[in-house]
Image (cartoon, rainbow, N blue to C red):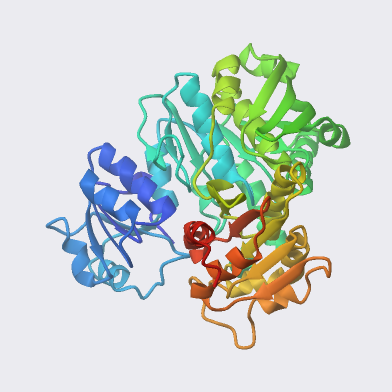
Amino acid sequence: MSEQPQTTDLTRVHMVGIGGAGMSGIARILLDRGYKVSGSDMKESRSVMALRTAGAAIQVGHSADNLRLSGELPSVVVTSFAAIPQDNPELVAAREAGIPVIRRSDVLALLMQNRRAFLLAGTHGKTSTTSMAVAALQAAHQDPSFAIGGQLNRAGTNAHHGTGEIFVAEADESDGSFLSYSPEVAVVTNIEPDHLDYFKTEAAYREVFEKFAHCIVPGGYLVACLDDPGSAALAEGLVAAAARGEAQPFTVVGYGTAEGCDAHSSVPPAAIIDSTEVTAEGTVSTLRLTEAVNQAVGQGAGTYSLRVAIPGTHMVLNATAAALGSVLLGADVEKVIEGIGGFDGVRRRFEYHGTRREVEVYDDYAHHPTEVAAVLSAARQRVQARGGRIVAIFQPHLYSRTISFAAEFAEALSLADQVVLLDIFGAREEPVEGVDSRIIGNKIDSATEWVFEPDFSAVAGVVANLAQPGDMVLTIGAGTVTMLADEILLQLESGDRG
């Protein structure tokens, strides 16, 4: 168990795994607030170098001696319990010295104290939705603090210590640590079983979202997507509980397409997408904010044209969540809509890398079947107009996830025309004998061609050989596959096709 955040001394913070997406953002805010920060990571990275420039003392490699990088022992050590093993020498040394070892989420909860917390939760879409919320609030001149699991393309950073009273952050459910937070507005984009290596059962995974809802402060809002069965079920259950007289100090509202809102009519809809037109540049939707918004903040009800530059129906839903949550916090609705229209994406979320020989190359972080299906569906919208094909390069993330969802990954990848499967990226897990990516490939629809290429160095050449003018190539996954996009462009340009 971690120490309660309100009793933690942040005078000197040491972070194990400081270069990670979530950890580096927390480090940046701590530095901006004037705290001493030290840390360690397994490798050099842009995040590590940027934090050093900002004043953090960082060592590559893990050692008990790293605890004295700032010149004295830290007042607290921060880690990710899921990513860093408990026998890490720095964690062992900290416990022996009586130094509190806490989670990243505990520090984030501390940093959000005395701020109006706007938290974005869900199995998928957290980073994109959080990023759009930041763009919306910045356009409305709120200058929010934020901590995001990805890097905003325009801002070039994943965290910021703002002057405004709002703090926007992803609420990561993977180890239940988001129960440390006290949001004023909490969005749940979707709920679909994941992280079963931690939760063990689907029921336990769904239950943690209900517990999260009850972390909302009195007078706050749960904003639930009614197009997602899991999120809608959560909202309907909370509405039913309130109708039975069970104490509930927050208000539940829904958002989604007109069809989704009609299908779950017991949940009061606050934002309804009446229509969506897909174009080559993105999507334009007719968004209707209902009287429920006026009742909450005294402004905002009406019909608006919502432009989303990133393709895909899921991105329209994410943009709607970001807009609604921002308005519920009092931001000017017109400026919020304008800010989302100008949002140009997050690194590794349908990120465009370039075009060579009339082949477009994109990279995406998708590592769950639903995410893979969403990005490939969005890609299909882009390539249909020019008659091209989709070539997907997929690197499964974690042996446990690959085994649990092999059939679902295969179904999602069947949306591509060509699939190149890489070896499984084990991350924190040891290899499982007899298990590789072919357990997915063997289930892919026969209409989709696939190959298994375990030699990472050969993949770019294989893809360059497969790609034809008009095609879209996507590198997909949470591991090292992201390194391939630029290499594929180089091989396409040089004509060196392996």
Q: Looking at the image, which residue is at 63% across and 53% down? A: 208
- Count of number-bearing discs: 0
Residue 68 location, quadrant? bottom left
Residue 290 location, quadrant? top right
Counting from the top left corner in percent of width and height, residue 343 is at 54, 31
Counting from the top left corner in percent of width and height, residue 87 is at 36, 76
Counting from the top left corner in percent of width and height, residue 221 is at 63, 30
- Left or right of residue 272, residue 483 in this image: left
Q: Is residue 471 visible?
A: yes
Q: Is residue 215 above or below residue 485?
A: above
Q: Looking at the image, which residue is at 73% across and 23% down? A: 287
Relative depth, front residue between 254 and 159:
159
Residue 466 location, quadrant? bottom right
For the N terminus, the image quarter is: bottom left
Q: Residue furthest top?
A: 298
Q: Is residue 147 above or below residue 82?
A: above
Q: Residue furthest left?
A: 71
For the C terminus, the image quarter is: bottom right
Relative depth, front residue between 280 and 237:
280
Relative depth, front residue between 467 and 423:
467
Q: Is residue 409 above or below residue 302?
A: below
Counting from the top left corner in percent of width and height, residue 304 is at 70, 17
Relative depth, front residue between 367 and 490:
490
Q: Is residue 428 above or below residue 349?
A: below
- Left or right of residue 382, residue 24 in this image: left
Q: Is residue 249 visible?
A: no
Q: Residue furthest front?
A: 495
